[in-house]
Image (spheres, rainbow, N blue to C red):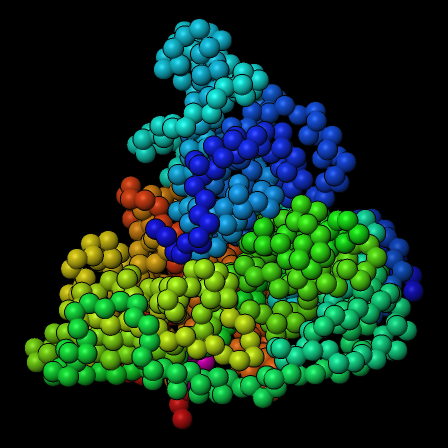
Amino acid sequence: MKIWTMPKRIDVDKDDKEERRKGLSRRTFLVTGAAAGGGLLLGVYLPRSIGAKAQTAAEAFAPNAFVRIKPDDTITLVMPQVEMGQGTYTSMSMLVAEELEVDLAKVGLEAAPPSDELYANPLLGFQVTGGSTSVMGFWEPLRRAGATARVMLIQAAASQWNVDPASCKAEKGEVISPVGDRLTYGALVDAAAKLPVPDKVALKDPKDFTLIGTPAKRLDTPEKVNGKAKFGIDAMIPGMKFATVAACPVFGGKLKSVDDSKTMAIKGVHQVVKIEDAVAVVGDNMWAAKQGLGALNIEWDDGPNANVTTASIVEQMARASQNEGVVARSDGDFAKAIPGAAKKIDAVYEMPFLAHAAMEPMNCTVHVTKDSCDIWVGIQVVSRAQATAAQVTGLSPEKVQVHNHLLGGGFGRRLDVDGITQAVAIAKQVDGPVKIVWSREEDIQHDVYRPYYYDRFTAGFDAQDQLVAYHHRVTASSILARWAPPAFVNGLDEDAVNGAAKEFPYGIPNILVDYVRDEPPGLTTGWWRGVGPTHNIFVVESFIDELAAATKKDPVEFRRSLLGKRPRVVGVLNLAAEKAGWGTSLPDGVGRGVSVQFAMGSYLSQVAEVEVSKEGEVKVRRVVCAVDCGQIINPDTIVAQIEGGIIFGISAALWGEVTLKGGRVEQHNFNDYRVLRINEAPAIEVHLVKNSEAPGGIGEPGTIGIAPAMANAIFAITGKRIRKLPIKDQLRPA
Amino acid sequence: MSFKIKVNGSDHEVDVDGGTPLLWVLRDVLGMTGTKFGCGVALCGACTVHLDGRPIRSCITPIESVGNSAITTIEAIGETPAGAKVQKAWLDLEVVQCGYCQPGQIMSASALLASNPNPTDADIDAAMSGNICRCGTYPRIRAAIKQVSQSA
């Protein structure tokens, strides 16, 4: 499944050939690989001199950009994807280990260096971890990388034994001959490295999988329970200083003047750095820098957005939504069908701007010299990090080293490099390495926000209460037009309608879905967990529930009646309904709501059991989620992602909202950007459907369907339809 | 000013302003980065360490208030019986996702279980609701605490 495609699409097979053609030897590869640090010690700064030594001493078998085997039997996966909690380090390793016939524990990881040529995400066309694409994108390339190495190692061993390769097999890091002789992979490195890389290799039949589909312990977690794991914010570089920053509180504004007389008198403060739209204070530690920043007297030029408010943005969107949009899907003829409808339902839905509030605040450590730039950071777009640093410093990209780290949460925030751009601009003025850390307030007030969405619906029933016409108009900013301009084609943002247009699963004779682009002034919009579908599944599944209610039908039965041609959707709906006890009685003030979705290649249905108190407080008591994501890689990680995704979605549904006044974001910290805590978390049951369909994504789908399930439950309890998120105090008695 | 503090059994002398929160002394001065910065105002619990076995938010604890108290951080919590059990349960049940908040979660859970080996759900809520996890690992945190308490 393709989410969107950049023009420069990299085919990994072709890439391998290309690499050989260009004479990019495995040695070149080792040079780039070694710069990223070794094994799981991603946070360790490996000085270039040590890296260089390792390069010249090492001989390795590296048949492609991903797999490297050394004579001492160390096996390394050069990891194209970044770990932000989703378990990709483990699932990607499982793909390679399965085909390479080695124990998972034998696979060491090394973060891939910046290279769109070698490490492009096959679905997105460049080096990026996002959109729940890792397993979908690398499912075949990484298995093929492992299988290629296995085939070549077997060939090397068979030649030494002078036997037919087909009579040999690979098992647990060894090749075994027909008479039981064994050679370890390490012993075969030299011979295998001399063989031509085969163009085609056969992958294992899924029925022979011994690792894929079985629960594997995560590779990244042992160091996350004892304080050893290194996130970007943990980079410690000899001689480094610490800085914190204040950007203009109004987006688009500039720094006018700074009086730093009080700041420079503070113990531990070294320097005040001014850039176009921000000021940073550099000190001996974060506290000195923070005290220094607080003591500055800053004058901002607020610029053109000084009067922007949420209300002014929504007013503009509401007006824009009256216009016809770019058609994203048209079945039958809605315009012709709707006038004849016996019953018409209209609704407008709204969803707010959202911050990400990852637990690790935005940060970046940078060391700029006249001919080099080193960056220590956790980022979802490694090559873009390199590119922006090159641009800001004026250095060529190969002079920029990106030392990528574990991410203390991504959720889409670290798909943008604004923090790196700013950090490099500051570091250019600092002598020696400097770690720039944003306060939580800065993090929330200078986020790249999930767009505001304004959705109009019209549906028509015939005289027999059959749904005959359906129109959904999405009005929103275009993330793709900013973030991946070539993917924004003919005025249609595929992400803005993702989940509402071609993925819309319901069979209705006349369907029209269109998109109106409307860019809000005063802030930048970007990716947020679940991207387009988090928005569309909320509005679609809420509106479908409205239609069920309008015809007095049971919400599950109504959906089923429209899903005849979608067996996998019906499968998860039935499973979730059954496991949740749909239709069984509940105490007063408690109700159930349902949602179904097809997004990121996976099918989910959620049933939320919600309680609304007399005071209008909403509590989610229990969530049952059925998941059909095709071929399962690591089942426990799927369950964990669904649990966590649901909790992430509940926070947003209940309270998540970024608002603007005077061009300034009104929220500050976890006091007014509230997120779910353990005492508020529901019991969650996840039921996995087992099949051998192509694998779907799993990092985001859990977040997508929870808000509509909650809102539909609230309707079941109170009769009040939630058409605007967050739910907040909408149920409080007047 | 110079302060003498005891961290994980070792003495350290640090020269910082007396108002400097313990968090930044640990992270930036001593280079012990296991303790995390999340909010700076005791709202999220990522910076939780133990002061004489009690869980405190190091981001609002000035160094001048620490005195002779023994500071224990995530780097050494595994040397305590409760801490070791919590770490094991965390791995057994695969609690961790991104892991950024987990040092704070583990410090809060270890303090809870050291003082109350059989916490009720309400006890768990009271001890753990100051620790935010954006990955949403709460169900597993609760289950892991219960696993430790059942094995006690």
Q: Which of the pair A233/A65 is nearer the observer?
A: A65
Q: Is residue A726 within the magenta segment?
A: yes
Q: Which of the pair A703/A193 is nearer the observer?
A: A193
Answer left or right for A372 relative to A658: right
Q: Position of residue A111 (x, y in %)?
A: 59, 42
The magenta region covers A724-730
Question: Can you tell which quarter of the image residue A179 is in?
Answer: top left
Q: Residue furthest left?
A: A464
| Numbered circles on residues, count | 0
Name the residue: 44% across, 12% down: A158
Q: On screen, A406 above or below A545?
A: above
Q: On screen, A21 above or below A564?
A: above
Q: Is residue B98 something that shows in the picture?
A: no
Q: Position of residue B99 (x, y in %)?
A: 58, 53
Name the residue: 44% across, 16% down: A155
Q: Which of the pair A666/B45 is nearer the observer?
A: A666
Q: Is residue A520 something that shows in the picture?
A: yes
Q: Position of residue A480 (x, y in %)?
A: 46, 64
Location of the C terminus of chain A by quadrant is bottom left
Q: Residue furthest bottom?
A: A734
Q: On screen, A447 above or below A302?
A: above
Name the residue: 49% across, 29% down: A103
Q: Position of residue A396 (x, y in %)?
A: 68, 50
Q: Is residue A320 within the magenta segment?
A: no
Q: Residue furthest front?
A: A22
By secondary structure, the bulk of the magenta-drawn segment is best described as loop
Answer left or right for A691 relative to A74: left
